[in-house]
Amino acid sequence: MAVDATSLQQPAVAPARGQDSVQGRMHFLARDRRYETEKPFTLRYAPAPEDGIPQTNIERVEQPVEFRDLRGRTDLRYDDCGFAVVPLCTSMAYDDYAQPERIEGVHAPQVLAAVRQALAAASAELIDYVVRRRHAAWPVSTGRPYGTQQPASRAHIDHTYEGGVAVIREAHGVDAEAVLARRWQLVNAWHPLRGPLVDWPLAVCDARTVDFARDTMAGDVVDRHQVFENTQVHHNAGQQWYYLSGQMPDELIVFKNADSAEPAGATPGVPHASFDNPRRTQTDFRRESIEMRILVVW
């Protein structure tokens, strides 16, 4: 089923013209021969010394990237590139995002309604969400836990296709087969808690410009009792990256992470990460954001 999201690039109030592009840097999975025999992994816990395993085997490399501005563009279609800007009607105040009951009871239904309408879907279901608040010291390590989740600065896709199927099976149990038999996508809906956002904005990559055979590979994110499979991304100069300058809390970036469609004409997922915007200043809001992972079904 085709999802035509051309109109999603048109917010209710026409924004100021974008700033075209900025030159920045982003981290990617290194092209290391170890990954010919070793799957990339990260443990979400500190292994015991006697276990004899590192917390991660991921070698990352920083590369220069041009980030094109999405602001005011009308030439990108969700079905082609895998992402869109969606207007959000929200009744949330900044302080509400510190209250899980407000996020789950008020904000989630508003986001789900916006995504369902924008993608002309039969249903949109919340899988989980995360609030990130950048610590003043980050990305420099303090040697202690930051206390809140920090921006994700390495290019990745949240799921592989198989990882997406596993998420649906966990969410729906014995009813999962009925969901998997339909057209589905796992998408993220992302926005800042305060704006305009300049500090460490989200960037998304046009999926048409990704050589998925050469530039991506499956990786594992390991909790103590569960393993999640995501997609790690190598740098390629042909990739085209975008961000939304001055993003506001009522502007969602919706992007695809997994898709049930056949490979022909379908983008498997959208690489994404945050980057250190060279235009940020000491007076800009420090990055705070919320992202919701959503199962969309047609």
Image (cartoon, rainbow, N blue to C red):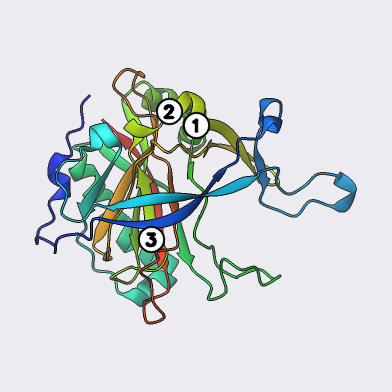
Q: What amino acid does circle 1 point to?
A: Asp
Tell me the number on the disc at residue 79. none
Q: Nearer the viewer, mark 2 or mark 3?
A: 2
Q: Secondary structure at mark 3?
A: loop
Residue topped by disc 2: 211
Q: Are marks 2 and 1 in contact (CB under 8 Å)?
A: yes
Drawn side of residue 240 relative to residue 223, left or right: left
Q: Which residue is mark 1?
A: 215
Question: Quadrant where the N terminus lies?
Answer: top left
Q: Which residue is mark 3?
A: 201
Name the outermost residue toward the bottom: 283
Q: Residue at x 16, y 41 (%)?
A: 75
The correct choice, above or below, for 40 with respect to 46 in the image is above
Q: Are marks 1 and 3 in contact (CB under 8 Å)?
A: no
Q: Where the C terminus falls, by quadrant?
A: top left
Q: Residue at 61% of width from left, 68% of height from top?
A: 140
Q: Quadrant of residue 208?
A: top left
Of the image marks 2 and 3, the number of the one nearer the N terminus = 3
| 10 Å crowding of disc 1: few (<14), some (14-19), many (20+) | some
Mark 1 or mark 3, which has the lower sequence index?
A: 3
Measured from the top left, where is residue 79 in percent x and y?
24, 32
Q: Give the camera-side residue of 10 and 32.
A: 32
Nearer the observer: mark 1 or 3; the answer is: 1
